[in-house]
Image: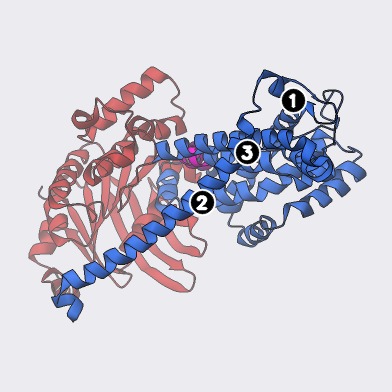
């Protein structure tokens, strides 16, 4: 009864809890920002035209990281070109045909560590299907990895659309395909774009699967086709740190900053899109 | 509106010994009813009496529910709509529906109406434009939205959303429009607008409206059906049933003792 008769006391308690939560969330955000900046800033001083356009030379002591940028770009394109359409399709089918138990399997798949996907890709694409270590094998592996993520998001978004809207479309004489493609999918277009961008962010930064399926330490040529191996930003960073030590530290810092830049870029676009969607 | 008993001539829909089930539960029991052209038929009764189920059987929208089964016949111009050779998509184009909660699609006002038009094969941009305008005018919404047709329909007020849904339904020019408690989510002012709109629409369309509001039935309908626990208890011209209900349950409902 105290709270009822003395509202000021209750609301005071409430504001205190709010304050604590606000401080907590701000400090967590700040910590994340600091981590980002720590990865971004030390490398900025190595940015110049040469760094973005040259091959690494002199045992990673000079040159640039152009092949790694190009490789990351190609692997990401392959991965998204496959996973986005398939992911949307799978999400739609799972939601509109009530395949809840398959959805459960997909949810589990999205929790599997990426290195396991790497091993699977190595076995299936590189060895069994004969793609060897290549951009295509790496892209396919990463597309398998983000497929469950994309389809889960599409599924959840589709499910959030009230049943009444579907009924209203059917009541106009729409067929199932006309409900899905002309009403439901346009309604979730913005979410799908956001999800795709977030997946792009994940794909760009993925390392372990690429070490197993696509990446090489060092390439003297640019990849001739999607069946060539390639350097990528995250694997380059890993190899520099693991094998070259202090003399290549500068290049590692530079590579990290470029990688972070790309990730920030992609997430910013996703964030802006989500904002506009609301 | 009052009873226009004299011109109750052309039967559009005839419901014959019709029963509907959700799994083992019988929601509508042996209903018999004739719906006349260009009249407003109200189906009235307390919640859970089966009135919505009966309405949702007329355009077969309840077919979407997995456990739904029917018995008996619903004749639309003499043809049973539950026959195997009926194309339910054509059926639903000829028998439109407006729902309890407004159901604007999350797209622009214009696209909401264009969606239905494209379904019936209207693809010419100019023709779509004209029909969108015609439907919005008919639904008494044109004046309010003519300068913002590209606005997202979900940002309209509840009453405007419901009139948009009516515009969307009439744009494809059905013969019959089913209204499932169209004002239960609206305020009195919006309700009044929708009611007078429905009265006007009766000159072009045949209307069946489900309501648990006696006042609404008396204000706008020509013929009233009273349902209770899945059965049609009584039906008559609206003025007649209100003045002189034959059954005790109808009397109790009308006097507010049940419902």
To which chain does the residue with label 2 belong?
A: A
Q: What residue is shown at x 48% (from left), y 59% (from top)?
A: B65
Left or right, B246 with reference to B58: left
Q: Is mark 2 on a helix, strand or loop?
A: helix
Q: Name the residue under label 1.
A: A64
| A185 inside magenta stretch | yes
Residues in magenta, as a range: A180-191
| Place of residue A30 in the rendered image (x, y in percent of width and height, measured from the top left) | 47, 49
Q: Colour of chain A?
A: blue
Q: What residue is shown at x 61% (from left), y 30% (from top)?
A: A44
Coloring scheme of the render?
A: by chain
Q: How far apart are marks 2 and 3 (CA)?
A: 23 Å
Q: Mark 2 points at which residue?
A: A31
Instruction: Tell me if mark 3 has few (under 14), some (14-19) or many (20+) residues whose alpha carbon lies within 10 angstroms of its own.
Output: many
| Place of residue B167 in the rendered image (x, y in percent of width and height, measured from the top left) | 29, 36
Tell whether label 3 touches label 2 (CB within 8 Å): no
Q: What element carries label 1?
A: loop
Disc 1 with disc 2 on a shared chain = yes
| Place of residue A236 in the rendered image (x, y in percent of width and height, measured from the top left) | 77, 37
* Residue B82 appears in the rendering: no
Q: Name the residue under label 3.
A: A200
């Amino acid at each position: 009864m105290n709270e009822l008769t003395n509202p000021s006391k209750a609301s005071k308690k409430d504001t205190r809890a709010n304050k604590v939560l606000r401080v907590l969330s701000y400090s967590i955000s700040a910590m994340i920002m600091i981590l980002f900046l720590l990865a971004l800033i030390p490398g900025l001083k190595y940015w110049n035209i040469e760094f973005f356009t040259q091959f690494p030379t002199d045992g990673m002591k000079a040159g640039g990281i152009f092949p790694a940028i190009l490789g990351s770009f190609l692997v990401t394109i392959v991965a998204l070109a496959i996973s986005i359409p398939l992911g949307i399709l799978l999400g739609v089918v799972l939601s509109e045909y009530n395949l809840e138990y398959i959805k459960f399997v997909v949810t589990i798949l999205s929790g599997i560590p990426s290195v396991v996907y790497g091993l699977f890709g190595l076995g299936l694409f590189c060895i069994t299907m004969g793609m060897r270590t290549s951009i295509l094998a790496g892209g396919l592996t990463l597309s398998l990895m983000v497929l469950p993520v994309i389809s889960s998001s599409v599924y959840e978004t589709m499910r959030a659309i009230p049943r009444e809207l579907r009924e209203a479309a059917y009541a106009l004489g729409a067929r199932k395909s006309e409900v899905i493609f002309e009403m439901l999918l346009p309604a979730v277009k913005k979410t799908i774009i956001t999800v795709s961008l977030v997946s792009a962010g994940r794909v760009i930064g993925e390392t372990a699967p690429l070490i197993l399926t696509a990446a090489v330490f060092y390439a003297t040529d640019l990849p001739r086709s999607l069946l060539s191996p390639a350097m990528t930003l995250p694997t380059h960073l890993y190899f520099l740190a693991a094998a070259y030590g202090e003399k290549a530290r500068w290049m590692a810092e530079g590579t990290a900053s470029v990688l972070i830049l790309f990730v920030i870029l992609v997430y910013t676009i996703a964030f802006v899109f989500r904002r506009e969607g609301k | 509106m009052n009873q226009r008993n004299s011109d109750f001539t052309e039967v559009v829909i005839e419901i014959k010994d019709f029963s509907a089930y959700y799994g083992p539960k019988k929601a509508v029991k042996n209903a018999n009813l004739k719906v006349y052209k260009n009249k407003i038929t109200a189906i009235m009764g307390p919640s859970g009496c089966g009135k919505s189920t009966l309405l949702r059987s007329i355009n077969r929208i309840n077919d979407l529910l997995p456990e739904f089964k029917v018995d008996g016949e619903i004749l639309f111009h003499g043809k049973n709509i539950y026959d195997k050779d009926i194309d339910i998509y054509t059926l639903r184009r000829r028998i439109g529906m407006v729902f309890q909660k407004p159901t604007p699609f999350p797209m622009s006002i214009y696209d909401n109406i264009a969606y239905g038009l494209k379904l019936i094969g209207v693809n010419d941009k100019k023709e779509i434009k004209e029909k969108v305008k015609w439907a919005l005018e008919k639904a008494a919404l044109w004046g309010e939205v003519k300068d913002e047709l590209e606005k997202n329909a979900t940002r309209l007020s509840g009453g405007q959303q419901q009139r948009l849904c009516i515009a969307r339904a009439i744009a494809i020019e059905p013969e019959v429009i089913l209204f499932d408690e169209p004002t239960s989510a609206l305020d009195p002012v919006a309700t009044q607008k929708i009611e007078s709109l429905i009265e006007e629409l009766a000159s072009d369309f045949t209307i069946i409206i489900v309501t648990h509001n006696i006042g609404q039935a008396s204000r706008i309908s020509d013929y009233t059906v009273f349902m209770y626990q899945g059965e049609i208890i009584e039906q008559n011209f609206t003025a007649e049933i209100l003045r002189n209900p034959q059954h005790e349950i109808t009397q109790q409902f009308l006097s507010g003792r049940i419902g």
